[in-house]
Image (tube, rainbow, N blue to C red):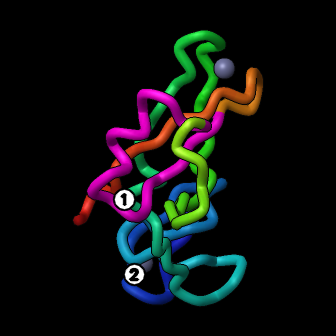
Amino acid sequence: MTHCPNCNEKIEEGFEVCWKCNYSLTEQKIIEFPDEDASSRNLNCLRCCVSMLYSGKFKFHEGVNPGVFGNIFEIFLNRESFDLYSCPKCGKIEFFRPLNK
Ligand SMILES: [Zn+2]
Ligand SMILES: [Zn+2]
């Protein structure tokens, strides 16, 4: 058992980051999670039952052939960027609308 040097909250043995203020004991500073909302989605690949990985933002821009996306192209019409998730096992890719927009 140790204490967070930043907010003095108790930190259980084995943890390296304070759950309360995100202070990292290893880096000795508060770490930030800029994409916390997006990456906190807990998605499982329906086929493989493994967690899908947040792969960043997909930006839709001119020059992409709509035919590549087929039916899902419709969801792109009024949006410009999406959260992209992929399954590390079978390579399946899924798009999600950004949470805060
Ligand atoms: Zn703390
Ligand atoms: Zn999969």
User: Label 1: which residue?
Assistant: 37
Is residue 68 placed above or below 15 in the rendered structure? above
Q: Is mark 1 within 8 Å of ligand 1?
A: no
User: Label 2: which residue?
Assistant: 8
Q: Is mark 2 within 8 Å of ligand 1?
A: yes
Camera-nearest residue between 72 and 30: 72
Camera-nearest residue between 32 and 97: 97
Which amino acid, mark 1? Asp
Q: Position of residue 33 (x, y in %)?
A: 49, 72
Residue visible at 64% across and 77% down? Answer: 25
Q: Secondary structure at mark 2?
A: loop
Q: Secondary structure at mark 1?
A: helix
Q: Residue furthest left?
A: 101
| Disc 2 versus disc 1: nearer the observer | 1
Which amino acid, mark 2? Asn
Residue visible at 56% across and 42% down? Answer: 85
Looking at the rendering, the stretch of residues picked out in magenta corresponds to: 68-86
